[in-house]
Image (tube, rainbow, N blue to C red):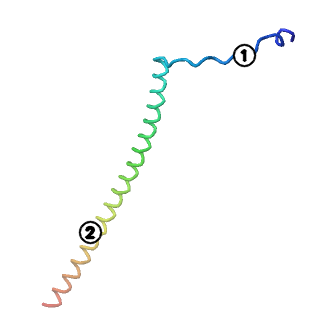
Amino acid sequence: LALARDRLPKQPEPPRAKSHWDYVLDEMEWMATDYREEDRWKQSMRKREAKSIEKFFADAQLRAERAERDNRYRLVRISGVL
């Protein structure tokens, strides 16, 4: 215990200039953030594209049903004229 009391207090380290490795670490941090954001963006685009494809096929089915109904109505009108 006596040695710990007699020890000098810890001195703060002086600021140091950035080394090449510090720049590499900054770049790695930036790339990780960029990849994460790009992945989120791609996922949202996939969801949007899937919804638009689903809507397209639902609309296509409605168009086909409407065309069939209109065709039947047209045939009934033609047969009524004859």
Which quadrant of the view contains residue 24? top left
Examine the image and state in which quarter residue 65 appears: bottom left
Numbered mark located on residue 34 in the image: none
Q: Are marks 2 and 1 in contact (CB under 8 Å)?
A: no
> Element type at marker 2?
helix
Of residues 59 and 49, the one nearer the viewer is 49
**Near-viewer residue (62 or 14):** 14
Disc number placed over residue 64 in the picture, else none: 2
> What residue sits 41% from the left and 40% below the top?
38
Q: Residue furthest left?
A: 82
Q: CA distance from mark 2 to mark 1?
A: 81 Å
Question: Which x, y percent locates residue 22?
Answer: 49, 21
Q: Is residue 22 above or below residue 36?
A: above
Which quadrant of the rendered structure holds the C terminus?
bottom left
Q: Amino acid at mark 2?
A: Ala
Read off the residue under disc 1. 10
Q: Residues within 10 Å of mark 2 (few under 14, many from 20)?
A: few
Q: Secondary structure at mark 1?
A: loop
Mark 1, residues whose alpha carbon is within 10 Å: few (<14), some, or many (≥20)?
few
* Image position of 12 (left or right of 30): right
| Residue at figure coordinates x 42%, y 49% from the top left | 44
Where residue 64 appears, x then y in whole percent?
A: 26, 69
Q: Nearer the viewer, residue 65 or 33?
A: 33
Q: Is residue 15 left or right of residue 23?
A: right
Q: Where residue 19 sits: x, y (%)?
A: 48, 17
Q: Nearer the viewer, residue 62 or 23?
A: 23
